[in-house]
């Protein structure tokens, strides 16, 4: 993710700050204790518990560094209270071939497709930005398939 601008909603920023706090306090202490206990088993050269704990520690420290970088470089956008257009932070209800879908447009750093949070940089997210209720929006999905969406509701 080098040379990339991070966009976060206030909610996304708070969520990352909470995860960072948890990792730096509770999780770091928990892994430190696991390493200490594993060392007590003796020879660490063939100690799988020690290796697992050290690997987990490395992954956790990488995540801490990633979150710290995102938070230091991110632009926090304010979600407008009243707007007739789709903005970052908006929840948009669309009709896609008779199926109703709800998307929340967020920055790439906090996107989570399983939770319905899509990036403003994704094909669907970028296509919806700036449109109003009643607009029919067309875009091309990652597989090349044409996606047609009718905006039925916008919430902020």
Image (cartoon, rainbow, N blue to C red):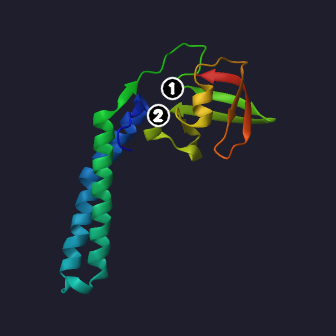
* Image label count: 2
In 3D space, how far apart are the residues under numbered discs 2 and 1 (Cα atoms)? 7 Å
Q: Residue at x 23, y 60 (%)?
A: 29
104 horizontally vs 6: left or right: right
Q: Residue at x 69, y 36 (%)?
A: 101
Residue 65 drawn at (x, y percent): 28, 49
- The answer to which of 28 and 109 lies nearer the viewer is 109
Q: Is residue 115 above or below residue 125?
A: below
Residue 93 drawn at (x, y percent): 67, 29
Residue 46 drawn at (x, y percent): 26, 86
Determine contact: label 2, label 1, CB under 8 Å.
yes
Q: Which mark is residue 88?
A: 1
Residue 41 drawn at (x, y percent): 21, 84
Q: Is residue 156 above or below residue 82?
A: below
Disc 2 designates what residue?
107
- The answer to which of 119 and 13 lies nearer the viewer is 119
Quadrant for the C terminus in the image:
top right
Give the structural element (helix, strand or loop) at label 2. Answer: loop
Quadrant for the N terminus in the image:
top left
In the displayed orientation, state which residue is furthest to the right: 98
31 horizontally vs 10: left or right: left
Q: Quadrant of residue 116?
A: top right
Q: Quadrant of residue 123?
A: top right
Q: Quadrant of residue 86?
A: top right
Q: Is residue 105 above or below residue 61?
A: above
- The answer to which of 108 and 102 lies nearer the viewer is 108
- The answer to which of 100 and 26 lies nearer the viewer is 100
């Amino acid at each position: 993710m080098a040379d990339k601008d991070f966009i976060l909603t206030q909610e996304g920023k708070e969520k990352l700050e909470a995860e960072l706090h948890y990792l730096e306090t509770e999780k770091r202490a928990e892994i430190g204790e696991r390493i200490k206990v594993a060392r007590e088993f003796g020879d660490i050269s063939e100690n799988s518990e020690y290796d697992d704990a050290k690997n987990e520690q490395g992954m956790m420290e990488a995540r801490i560094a990633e979150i710290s970088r995102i938070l230091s470089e991110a632009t926090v956008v304010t979600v407008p209270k009243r707007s007739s257009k789709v903005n970052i932070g908006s929840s948009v209800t669309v009709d896609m071939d008779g199926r109703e879908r709800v998307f929340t447009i967020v920055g790439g750093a906090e996107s989570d497709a399983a939770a319905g949070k899509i990036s403003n940089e994704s094909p669907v997210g970028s296509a919806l930005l700036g449109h109003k209720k009643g607009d029919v929006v067309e875009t091309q999905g990652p597989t090349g398939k044409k996606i047609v969406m009718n905006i039925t509701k916008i919430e902020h």
